[in-house]
Amino acid sequence: MSASEGREHWELLPGAGVGPLRFGLSPAEVADALRLSEPQKRVGGPYEQEDFADGVKAFYDAGKLACIALDAVTGPQVLLAGFALAGHDPEQAHQFLLDYAAEHGSCLLYTLDDSLALTDLGVLLRSQEVGGVQMSRPVFVREDWLESEYYRDRLPLEGVPATDESPWPS
């Protein structure tokens, strides 16, 4: 299956969310927006994480949606200036973000995991291994998380074992 074949297309809403999901929704409202009764899986750790069918992961801060990660192959596709954010070679996707930022005056940021973000749009591109190949996967984050060094350095990382450490400042 190619990175765009047979997948839903969602609209990017800078600062507000993506597709039917808006930052600030409760877990029940996220399930309603996705037209599902509940997630396939709930994951513990520093952020409440729910994994839904079709490659959508929702992360919550104090019970409100703060981050949305889409699978490189099975998640909905999101276009930015006609460029599909999911399913590309990560270097090609990063170059697109660099070019986009230069053309539109967007603020760029590299995170601790070497992901590249357009902070003013709340778009973060990560790499995902699919069948031995690295592909780009988009993550959409509340802008204040990317503006805050504290949150930026503690963005949700899928697949990282849960720790007992609290992500919140004392």
Image (cartoon, helix red, strand yellow):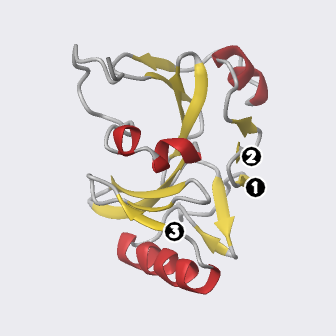
**Residue appearing at x 43%, y 44% in the figure:** 148
The nearer-to-camera label among 3 and 1 is 3
Label 3 Cα crowd, 10 Å radius (few <14 / some 14-19 / many 20+): few
Query: Looking at this view, is 56 or 44 the one in front?
Result: 44
Query: Looking at this view, is 106 or 1 the one in front?
Result: 106
Decide: is 46 above or below 132: above
The amino acid type, in three-letter code, at marker 2 is Gly
Label 1 Cα crowd, 10 Å radius (few <14 / some 14-19 / many 20+): some
Name the residue tied to disc 1.
Answer: 11
Name the residue tied to disc 2.
Answer: 19
- Mark 2 vs mark 3: which is more N-terminal? 2
Q: Is residue 74 visible?
A: yes
The amino acid type, in three-letter code, at marker 1 is Glu
Decide: is 169 above or below 6: above
- Picture coordinates of residue 50 (x, y %)? 51, 23
**Residue appearing at x 54%, y 37% in the figure:** 67
**Residue appearing at x 30%, y 34% in the figure:** 159
Name the residue tied to disc 3.
Answer: 107
- Mark 3 vs mark 1: which is more N-terminal? 1
